[in-house]
Every structure is written in structure tokens, then in C-alpha cells.
Image (cartoon, rainbow, N blue to C red):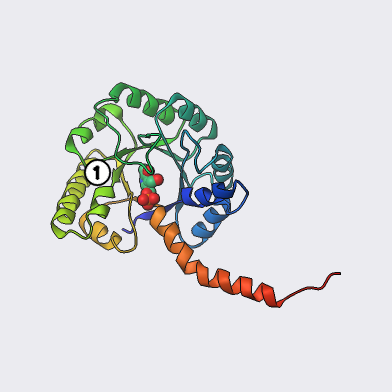
Amino acid sequence: MTPDLFVNVDHIATLRQARRGLSPCPLQAAKIVLEAGAKGITVHLREDRRHIQDRDVLALIQAHPQQITLEMAPTAEMLGIALKLKPKQVTLVPELRRELTTESGLNLLAQTEELKAHTARLREAGIGVSLFLDPDPRQLELLSVIEPTAVELHTGKFASDFEKPEAREKALLELSVAGKLIQDHKLKLNAGHGLDALNLPALLGSVEGIAELHIGFALVARAVFVGLREATQETLRSMTAVEVTL
Ligand code: PXP
């Protein structure tokens, strides 16, 4: 079965925050990608609010209550926000203030009790809980303790090694073994990070049973080039439609 595409609209908000205005609006982006066939929207509300703002998460959940995945660090502040806004799914991710993007999966071994408590609180509120994990068997051993509803496998290593055949095959094998283990636990299997139209066929050819793909940067970057011609022509057309008002 083809996985559901969840489009991460953080980078639309990154562009908006460059001018601190209203445009481009992540809610409008969500409408377009859902109309185009995506099944859901993903946003990461970071502690430093560098892109997505609290008001974006609220507006997205109000407009699409069954389709929003909220990525967040397992902190008391974020737990409070999630319990108030009740997205359909939360993906717990590690967060380093100075990182450019999420660099690795969670360390379940170091945070077992904290993550177990967070997961339980979110699940009691009816929110699905996905853990963002590297395909590391030592981490996956703790799934039966923490009891999430899903795991999102971090595909960043596969994506960055995509051009190196040996390293790519190794990464794919690790992902496929981890994917089977996750499904043996009867958990939903999600995947994301660094994915694009070039590397997706290899991933989906090797890792079976992926339910959701969470994709952001490459899709938004591609949209810039797919749309630049039309934006230029639209501007040129507006220059020939001069209105004399004085
Ligand atoms: N999944 C998670 C948990 C992430 O943190 C990110 C990055 O925000 C993504 C998916 C999307 O990754 P990318 O922007 O590289 O497609």
C-alpha cells in the first residue's frame, strides 16, 4: 500500500518569519497540499519558535482536526500545549537549540521514565504518540516499556548516503530490519527526514509497511523552482496592466 504523505510546512513559516509578516501563510500552504493529495500536515513547534508559531498550530488544528501531526520536544511546556490543542498525533523529537534541523532520533535509554510519562499523558488525552527514532535495535527494545502508538524512523542517514551505494544499502538494511521490528510490536511505522522524489523509490522498495511519510524541506525547495516561472510571468503581466488613478 502507498504510504500517506504528510507535508511539513515549517519552511513556509521560515520564509514568513524572514519578514515577520503574514505571508507566506502555512495554513494556506496546508490547503494547497491537501487539495493536491497529501493526507496530512506536519509542523514542529520549536522552543525558540524560529518558524511555526503557537497560533499556526491552533489554526491548522481548527481547520484540519484529523490531519495534523505536531512535532515537539518532550518538555513540560510542549506537553501543556499539546494537551490543550489536541492534535491527532504528536511526534516526540529531541531538540537542540543550535541545530539547523532535528539531527538524531530520541535517546530512549537516557529518558525512559520521562518519555513513558509523556506518552501516557498524551495517549490518555486521545492523542497518538509517535517516537522519532534512529533504526537502532537498542532503542527499539524500549518500545514495550514506553508504549507509543507509532515510531517515525529517521531516514536522514539513508538520504545523506544516497549517492554512496554501499553506505546506502547498509542504511536501507538497518531501516528495513527496524521497520519489521516496529511492526512486530503492532505499532504504526512512519518515516521521515531528508526524503525527496529521487530517494523515495529506493526507500519504499526496501522498507515495507510504511504508513506515513513526513516530508518538508525538499518538497518546499522544489516548489520554489516549480513556481518561479509562474511568479515571474504574473509580475510581468501586472506591469502591463498599469492603472492610471490620478
Ligand atoms: N520528521 C521529523 C521528525 C523531523 O524533525 C523533520 C524535520 O523537521 C522531518 C520529518 C522532515 O524532514 P525534511 O524537512 O528533511 O523533509
Viewer-proximal residue among 73 and 147: 73
Quadrant (top left/top right/bottom left/bottom right) for the C terminus: bottom right
Q: Quadrant of residue 183?
A: top left
Circle 1 residue: 183
Foreground: 217 or 133? 217
Asked if ligand 1 lies within 8 A of label 1, the reply is no
Q: Left of 202 or right of it: where is 58? A: right
Lateral position of residue 180 relative to residue 225, left or right:
left
Q: Residue furthest bottom?
A: 240
Residue 155 in sight = no
- The amino acid pointed to by label 1 is Gln
Which residue sits furthest right? 246
User: From this viewpoint, is residue 227 visible?
Assistant: yes
Direction from residue 206 to residue 2 in the image, left or right:
right
At mark 1, the secondary structure is helix
Vertical position of residue 243 compared to residue 190: above or below? below
Residue 14 at x, y percent in the picture:
50, 48
- Image quarter of the N terminus: bottom left
Q: Nearer the viewer, residue 124 or 161?
A: 161
Q: Please report the residue visible at 56 percent of the width from the left and 43 percent of the height from the top.
A: 56
